[in-house]
Amino acid sequence: MSKYSTRVPRLGVVAAVILAGPVLFQPAFSQDASIQRSNQPAGAGVLRHIQARITGIDLSHNSVTLRDTRGEMAVIEVSPDVTELKEFDVGDTVKIAYRNAILTHLTKSASSGIRERIETEVVQPTQDGEASSTQSVELLATVLKIDRKKRLVTLRGPTLTEEFDVAPDCSIDGLKIGDSVRAKFVSARATSVERVGTAPQ
C-alpha cells in the first residue's frame, strides 16, 4: 500500500474555490532548501527537506501552512498515514520531508481573468479494498518567473505565490513572464513530519 493511501468507504470528491484576495506571500519554499536528489528527471518530484513553523492547519483538507526561517511560505498536504495533524498546533516548529507541487498542465488564458484556485480531492478505490487520495488543483494565475534549465515556474495565484516543478510532458515553450495562465498541478505532499519545537504557551 502506498504511504499516501487513506481508508474510505467509497469514491469521494471535495472541491473548494478561492477567489482573488488581498493576501500575497513570498514564493513557496524555493529550491535552495535542502533537497535529496536522485536520478529522477526534472519535474519528477525529488524529495526536499525543510525546517519551518506551522502558521495554519486545515484538518478538512489535511494540509498545513508553513513559514521557513526566510519568511517563505507553502501549503503542504499531510496524509493521515504520515501523521495526524490534530497532534500539532499553530506555532509548532517541524522538520518536514516533502515532494514539491508538480505542474502537469499549462495553457495561456485571457489577461482579464480573475485569479482563482480550485482544489479537488479525488479518492479512488484500490484492489485491496482501501483507497488512494490525490489532491488536484486548478489555478488561474500570473507567471512571475521561469527557469527553463531546471524546469521551474513561479506563479502568482489568488492568495499565494508558488514555485512549481514542471512535469516532463508539460510544455513551457512560448511561456513568458507576465502571461496569464490556467494551470493544473498536484499539490506538495509530505512524506514525514517531525516536531522539533512547540508553540509558545
Image: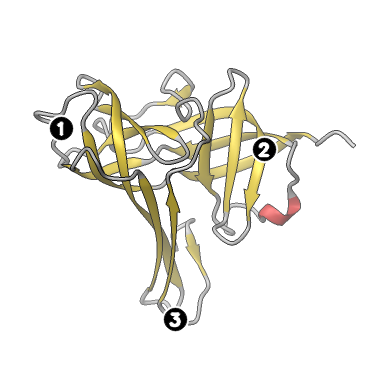
Of mark 2 and mark 3, the one earlier in the sequence is 3
Residue under label 1, please give it: 172
**Quadrant, the N terminus:** bottom left
- Amino acid carrying mark 2 in the image: Ile
Of mark 3 and mark 1, the one earlier in the sequence is 3
Q: Is residue 122 left or right of residue 43?
A: right
Of mark 1 and mark 2, the one earlier in the sequence is 2
Q: Find residue 10 and name its label.
A: 3
Q: State whether residue 121 is above or below residue 98.
A: below
What residue sits 81% from the left and 36% below the top?
199
Camera-nearest residue between 201 and 182? 182
Crowd class of label 1 (few under 14; some 14 to 19; many from 20; radius 10 Å): some
What residue sits 54% from the left and 55% below the top?
79
- Amino acid carrying mark 3 in the image: Arg
Residue under label 2, please give it: 54
Mark 2 vs mark 3: give the one in front: 2
Q: State whether residue 115 is above or below residue 80.
A: above
What residue sits 73% from the left and 42% below the top?
90
- Amino acid carrying mark 1 in the image: Ile
